[in-house]
Amino acid sequence: MSRAIPEATVARLPVYLRVLNELDHNSQKTVSSARLAELAGVNAAKVRKDLSFLGSYGTRGVGYDVGLLIFQMSRALGLTGERAVIIAGAGHLGQALANHRGFSDRGFDIVAMIDVDPAKIGTKLSGIPVVGPEGVAPLVLANAGCIVVIATPQNVAQEVADAVVAAGAKSLLNFAPVVLTVPDEVNIRSVDLGLELQVLSFYAERDERPRHSDGQQRSA
Amino acid sequence: MSRAIPEATVARLPVYLRVLNELDHNSQKTVSSARLAELAGVNAAKVRKDLSFLGSYGTRGVGYDVGLLIFQMSRALGLTGERAVIIAGAGHLGQALANHRGFSDRGFDIVAMIDVDPAKIGTKLSGIPVVGPEGVAPLVLANAGCIVVIATPQNVAQEVADAVVAAGAKSLLNFAPVVLTVPDEVNIRSVDLGLELQVLSFYAERDERPRHSDGQQRSA
DNA sequence: TAGATTGTTAATCGATTAACAATC
DNA sequence: TAGATTGTTAATCGATTAACAATC
């Protein structure tokens, strides 16, 4: 039985994974916690602590095997198989996400976009088929464990969430700037695209910089 | 001299502000910390603590004046005037951000998009003029305190960041899935659109839900 | 006044990180 | 062996929250 991994650690794993993939791409075989920390913009002790939750995959005096770490981390993140993703909303945001390297590159399989526009239904956008609202339920049923991304206008976001939850979806990623209500057993995460802009505005107004901002990288 | 506001609090202010604007829209004159907490998905004591950093704007036995709180919070966030935003990259993501209510609704003035595509330069997309790369420096100079949003392909993100920093930009919001290096006095925040997807994947894989996830809302 | 709710203190909790023994 | 680096402990730090006096 694996220990519970702290949420703060879970949120950093994708950052490490991105750095590790870059290292692998550059044919780096091993990496030390110090180097990984530098590249990810965090403290070396934190890196070792975080990685220790995955198991003991380092070698003292040597460092971590990049390939092994990528494998173990991908496994922990559930990225080994292709996980189905359904994007609700085929507007600019939906298409941006469909094209996004961070989506398609990382083991996610975007199976469809859903839209109400008759001009889009039945076509492919960015290589992804667009289906009408009636296609939601069959898609969710056919793709067990899928993640539904809500990239619709905010006024229909709740309605769409209700529909996909009714169809059995258990994981939602919401980009609409509204608070969505879902049953307790559904895991929903919200990304507020305007939030970071406001945080930046706060610091710009005061001519300040946060003392240290996790995952926010600065010059080496 | 105002106390330093903890970064965790700063990150929650936009969430409160969104809820307050909704309340205001529904003609709610006052709100208690308990109600605000419920709507924002956090603890009531945390709401009071967070709000106390802005000053004492509540009334014991009554609650907070919605309008006053919106005003004070907007001021703290530097959203009173229109803050100029320049979007680098007029692809789907850039256009999605240009259209995004969370950007334009909240006191941000998107002054231009920058792109290399000759077919787009000189036109308006979503009502925003598109200028070529040579327009960057004059734009940054003309809009002191502006925020530059990087919505370009990842392979040119660093180059673009270097250019806007050289032109004097002090606040960057990066959507490209790469680690950008900027001088120490520049405030950069990165949004990894794929990160939350991986976090969701982690919990889906384990059939778990995070015990409590800040700002992530659930059923009431 | 009685009831409600803030603002703040102080306790708790969890996350970060320095330090170092283990060990390659 | 000597040098390097992990894995983990324990101290530190900061954030959360229960509790309650202040007060509308």
Image: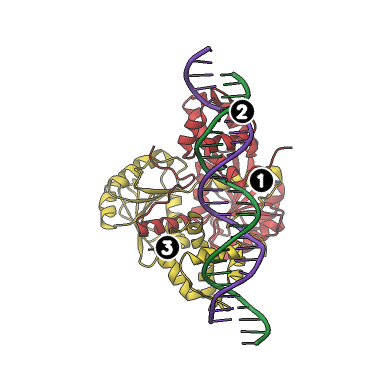
Chain colours: A yellow, B red, C purple, D green
Q: CA distance from mark 2 to mark 1?
A: 22 Å
Q: CA distance from mark 3 to mark 2?
A: 44 Å
The part of the image, by quadrant, that contains residue A158 is top left
Pointer 3 chain: A
Where residue A98 appears, as percent x and y from the top left, is 42, 57
Foreground disc of the pair 2, 1: 2
Mark 3: few/some/many CA within 10 Å (<14, 14-19, 20+): many
Residue in view at x 41 percent, y 41 percent? A180
Residue A113, disc: none
Pointer 1 chain: A
Mark 1: few/some/many CA within 10 Å (<14, 14-19, 20+): some
Identify the residue position indicated by label 2 in the image: B57
Where residue A4 appears, as percent x and y from the top left, is 43, 58
Residue in view at x 43 percent, y 71 percent? A71
Q: CA distance from mark 1 to mark 3?
A: 33 Å
Left or right of A115 on screen, residue B12: right
Identify the residue position indicated by label 1 in the image: A203
Rendered view: C10 above or below A215: above
Nearer the observer, A165 or A151: A165
Identify the residue position indicated by label 3 in the image: A77
Type of residue at label 1?
A: Tyr
Type of residue at label 2?
A: Tyr
Left or right of A92 on screen, residue B65: right
Nearer the observer, A163 or B60: B60
Where residue B208 appears, as percent x and y from the top left, is 37, 54
Judged from the image, the secondary structure of the residue bearing numbered disc 1 is helix
The part of the image, by quadrant, that contains residue D1 is bottom right
Pointer 2 chain: B
Both on one chain, marks 2 and 1? no
Judged from the image, the secondary structure of the residue bearing numbered disc 2 is loop
Where residue A181 appears, as percent x and y from the top left, is 38, 40
Q: Quadrant of the C terminus of chain A?
A: bottom right
